[in-house]
C-alpha cells in the first residue's frame, strides 16, 4: 500500500526551516509539562482493537518505505486516541491560553485547532517555492498532514503554518512553528490538536533545541504524568539507570530487544527489526517467533494456575484469585527492564487476568504504554540513546 507521504509534507518542513523564528536558545534548557491519559479507565477490549490498528499501519508504512528504497517511513501514525493515548497540557500565546493536545512520539507536526484567530498567531509566509497559496493577507504556507495510509484518507489535518509563544510550566518560548488547522478529519481525542514528539525537524523536541525529552507515566491513570524537555537526565541517576542505543534504521524510536526472560526461561528477542517504544499504543506486541516462544515459556511456568479462554487477541489468561504470575524482563542491547506484574498482566474482569502482550501481525514489535508505566523513559536524540529507570512517577 502506498503511503500519503508527498511533496506537501516536504513543503511543510521547508516552510518551517526558512520562515519560523528560532526558539530562544539562551533559555536554561529545561522545560516541564504534564500529560493525562484520555480515558483514566483502561478498556482492554478497545485497547486491543486500537493498538492493533496502529501497529498494522506502522508495519505497512515501514514495508512501503523499504519497497520504495527510502529506508524509513516519514508518514505519521494514526493515534490510539480513543483512550490509549495521552494529552499534553501547555499554553499558547503572549497572553497564555491553556490547552491540551495529544502527545505523540510517532509524528512530528504540532497543530492546533480553532485557536489561531483568537491568538492572532504570526503566519509563515515563506514556503520555499511551489505549493504556497495566496490569501487576503498575502502568501501563506499551506499544509496537509496525513496520518496513516493512502487507502484510508480520513485521518488528516490541513491549514497554514504559523509561529507562536508556547508556555511549558512557567517557561515561555517564542517562535515555535505549528500548524493552524482549518480542517481535520479523524478523532484526535478531546483536546485542541496534537503535539509531535518524534525526531523530525518539526517536532517540539527539535524546535526547543533541547536534544532530549522524557516522561514518567503513572500507573494510576487518573493522575497526571510528567513530560520533561532538556536536562532531565539530572533526574535519572543511580544504579538503576539502564540505556540502549536508538537504531537509526527507522523514523520511530526503535531499539534492539536481544532477549526476554519469563521466570527462569530466556527466549530470543525480536531480531533485526528491533522494537519501537511508542507513547500512543496501549498494548505491547512481539513479532514471531519471539511472541510464541515467550508465550510457551510463560505457560510452562504457570501450570499451577487455572487457564481460561482469552478474547480480543489475549491468548494467555488465568483466573486471578490467588494467582502469582512468572516474572518478565525485557533485555535490550545494554539494559534490562525488569517489569512489575502490573506492567504485563491486567484484569479483564473481576475474576480473570490476561497477559497484555499480543502477537504482532507483522515483523514489527512495539513496547506499549502500559509496560512503560512507572518507568522514567528518556529519549536522547542528540546521542541516539534511550534510557529508562524504575521510578515512582507520582513524585515527579
Image: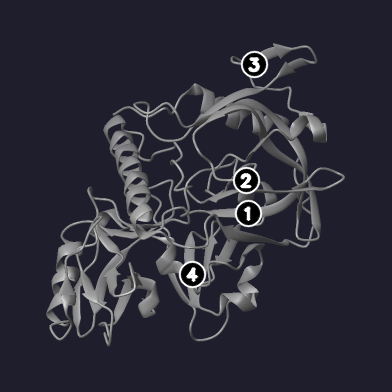
Q: CA distance from mark 4 to mark 1?
A: 21 Å
Mark 1: secondary structure:
strand
* Residue at the spot of label 3: 132
Which residue corresponds to the image point at 57% horizontal and 67% vertical from the top-left?
222
* Residue at the spot of label 1: 88
| Whether residue 59 can be seen here | yes
Q: Are marks 1 and 2 in contact (CB under 8 Å)?
A: no
* Residue at the spot of label 2: 191
Foreground disc of the pair 1, 3: 1
Q: Is residue 127 placed above or below 254 in the rendered structure?
A: above
Q: Earlier in the sequence, mark 4 or mark 1?
A: 1
Viewed as shown, does residue 130 lie left or right of 176?
A: left
Q: CA distance from mark 4 to mark 3?
A: 41 Å
Toward the viewer: 178 or 152? 152
Q: CA distance from mark 1 to mark 3?
A: 31 Å
Which residue corresponds to the image point at 54% horizontal and 61% vertical from the top-left?
380
Q: Earlier in the sequence, mark 1 or mark 3?
A: 1
**Quadrant, the C terminus:** bottom right
Q: CA distance from mark 1 to mark 2?
A: 9 Å
Q: Earlier in the sequence, mark 2 or mark 3?
A: 3
Q: Earlier in the sequence, mark 1 or mark 2?
A: 1
* Residue at the spot of label 4: 387
| Whether residue 26 can be seen here | no
Q: Position of residue 265 (x, y in %)?
A: 18, 81
Mark 2: secondary structure:
loop
Viewed as shown, does residue 9 lie left or right of 29?
A: left
Foreground disc of the pair 2, 4: 2
Q: Is residue 154 placed above or below 43 in the rendered structure?
A: above
Q: CA distance from mark 2 to mark 3?
A: 29 Å
Mark 3: secondary structure:
loop
Toward the viewer: 187 or 283? 187
Q: Are marks 2 and 3 in contact (CB under 8 Å)?
A: no
Amino acid at each position: 500500500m502506498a503511503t500519503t507521504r508527498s511533496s506537501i509534507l516536504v513543503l511543510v518542513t521547508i516552510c518551517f526551516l526558512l520562515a519560523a523564528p528560532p526558539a530562544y536558545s539562551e533559555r536554561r534548557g529545561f522545560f516541564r509539562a504534564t500529560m493525562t491519559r484520555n480515558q483514566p479507565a483502561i478498556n482492554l477490549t478497545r485497547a486491543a482493537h486500537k493498538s492493533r490498528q496502529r501497529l498494522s499501519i506502522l508495519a505497512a508504512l515501514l514495508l512501503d518505505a523499504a519497497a520504495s528504497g527510502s529506508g524509513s517511513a516519514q508518514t505519521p501514525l494514526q493515534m490510539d486516541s480513543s483512550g490509549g493515548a495521552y494529552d499534553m497540557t501547555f499554553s499558547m500565546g503572549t497572553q497564555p491560553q491553556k490547552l491540551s493536545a495529544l502527545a505523540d512520539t510517532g509524528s512530528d507536526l504540532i497543530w492546533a485547532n480553532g485557536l489561531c484567530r483568537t491568538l492572532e498567531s504570526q503566519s509563515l509566509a515563506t514556503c520555499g517555492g511551489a505549493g504556497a497559496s495566496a490569501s487576503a493577507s498575502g502568501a501563506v504556507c499551506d499544509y496537509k498532514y496525513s496520518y496513516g495510509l493512502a487507502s484510508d484518507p480520513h485521518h488528516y489535518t490541513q491549514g497554514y503554518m504559523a509561529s507562536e509563544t508556547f508556555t511549558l510550566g512557567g517557561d515561555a518560548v517564542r517562535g515555535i512553528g505549528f500548524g493552524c488547522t482549518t480542517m481535520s478529519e479523524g478523532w484526535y481525542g478531546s483536546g485542541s490538536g496534537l503535539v509531535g514528539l518524534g525526531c523530525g525537524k518539526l517536532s517540539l523536541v527539535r524546535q526547543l533545541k533541547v536534544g532530549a525529552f522524557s516522561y514518567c507515566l503513572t500507573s494510576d491513570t487518573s493522575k497526571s504524568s510528567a513530560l520533561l524537555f532538556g536536562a532531565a537526565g539530572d533526574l535519572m541517576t543511580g544504579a538503576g539507570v539502564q540505556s540502549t542505543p536508538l537504531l537509526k534504521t527507522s523514523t520511530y524510536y526503535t531499539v534492539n530487544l536481544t532477549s526476554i526472560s519469563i521466570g527462569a526461561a530466556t527466549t530470543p528477542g525480536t531480531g533485526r527489526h528491533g522494537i519501537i517504544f511508542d507513547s500512543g499504543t496501549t498494548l505491547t506486541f512481539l513479532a514471531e517467533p519471539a511472541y510464541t516462544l515467550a508465550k510457551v515459556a510463560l505457560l510452562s511456568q504457570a501450570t499451577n494456575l487455572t487457564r481460561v479462554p482469552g478474547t480480543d487477541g489475549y491468548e494467555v489468561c488465568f483466573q486471578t484469585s490467588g494467582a502469582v504470575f512468572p516474572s518478565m524482563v525485557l533485555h535490550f542491547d545494554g539494559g534490562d527492564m525488569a517489569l512489575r506484574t502490573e506492567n504485563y498482566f491486567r484484569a479483564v474482569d473481576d475474576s480473570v487476568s490476561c497477559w497484555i502482550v499480543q502477537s504482532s501481525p507483522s515483523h514489527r514489535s512495539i513496547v506499549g504504554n502500559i509496560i512503560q508505566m512507572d518507568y522514567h523513559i528518556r529519549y536522547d536524540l542528540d546521542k541516539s540513546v534511550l534510557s529508562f529507570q524504575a521510578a515512582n512517577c507520582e513524585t515527579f
